[in-house]
C-alpha cells in the first residue's frame, strides 16, 4: 500500500512539473529563451571595472593625500568596510564630511 501511494505521489509531482514547462523542441528560434546578457566576456568585464575604479579618485589628490584619507578611515570599521566596497572618497565623505584638501 505504501509503494502504491508513493508511486501515485511521484506521478503527480512529475505531471505538475511537466505541465508548466513549454516544449522547447516545438518552439521557433525567435520564441526560445536566449542567454544573451547573462554572461559577459572577461575582457569586457575587466574594462568596465577599470573604468569604474579610475573614476573614483579626483585628479587633484596626490597619492600621499589619498593615503592620509585611508589611514583616517581605517580607524572606523564601518568606514573601512565602505572604503572596500565604494572607494576611499565615498567612504571618507560619508563618515567625515568633505575632504579637507
Image (tube, rainbow, N blue to C red):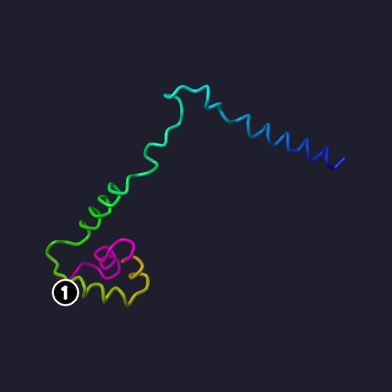
Q: Quadrant of residue 12?
A: top right
Q: Which of 38 and 73 is in front in this view?
A: 38
Residue annotated with mark 1? 64
Q: In this view, does 92 lie above or below 37?
A: below
Residue 17 in the magenta stretch? The answer is no
Q: Which of 69 and 63 is in front in this view?
A: 63
Residue 89 in the magenta stretch? The answer is yes
Residue drawn where x is 42% and y is 33% of the image: 34
The N terminus is located in which quarter? Answer: top right
Q: Is the magenta stretch mostly helix, strand or loop?
A: helix
Residue extent of the magenta highlight: 84-100
| Disc 1 secondary structure class | helix
Q: Nearer the viewer, residue 93 or 70?
A: 70
Q: In this view, does 86 lie above or below 43?
A: below
Q: Where does residue 35 sit, x and y in percent of width and height?
A: 42, 37
The C terminus is located in which quarter? Answer: bottom left
Q: Is residue 89 above or below residue 68?
A: above
Amino acid at each position: 500500500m505504501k509503494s502504491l501511494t508513493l508511486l501515485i505521489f511521484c506521478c503527480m509531482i512529475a505531471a505538475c512539473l511537466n505541465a508548466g514547462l513549454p516544449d522547447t523542441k516545438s518552439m521557433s528560434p525567435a520564441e526560445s529563451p536566449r542567454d544573451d546578457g547573462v554572461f559577459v566576456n572577461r575582457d569586457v568585464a575587466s574594462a568596465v571595472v577599470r573604468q569604474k575604479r579610475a573614476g573614483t579618485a579626483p585628479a587633484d589628490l596626490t597619492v600621499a593625500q589619498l593615503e592620509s584619507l585611508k589611514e583616517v578611515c581605517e580607524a572606523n570599521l564601518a568606514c573601512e568596510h565602505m572604503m572596500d566596497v565604494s572607494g576611499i572618497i565615498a567612504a571618507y565623505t560619508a563618515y567625515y564630511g568633505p575632504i579637507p584638501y
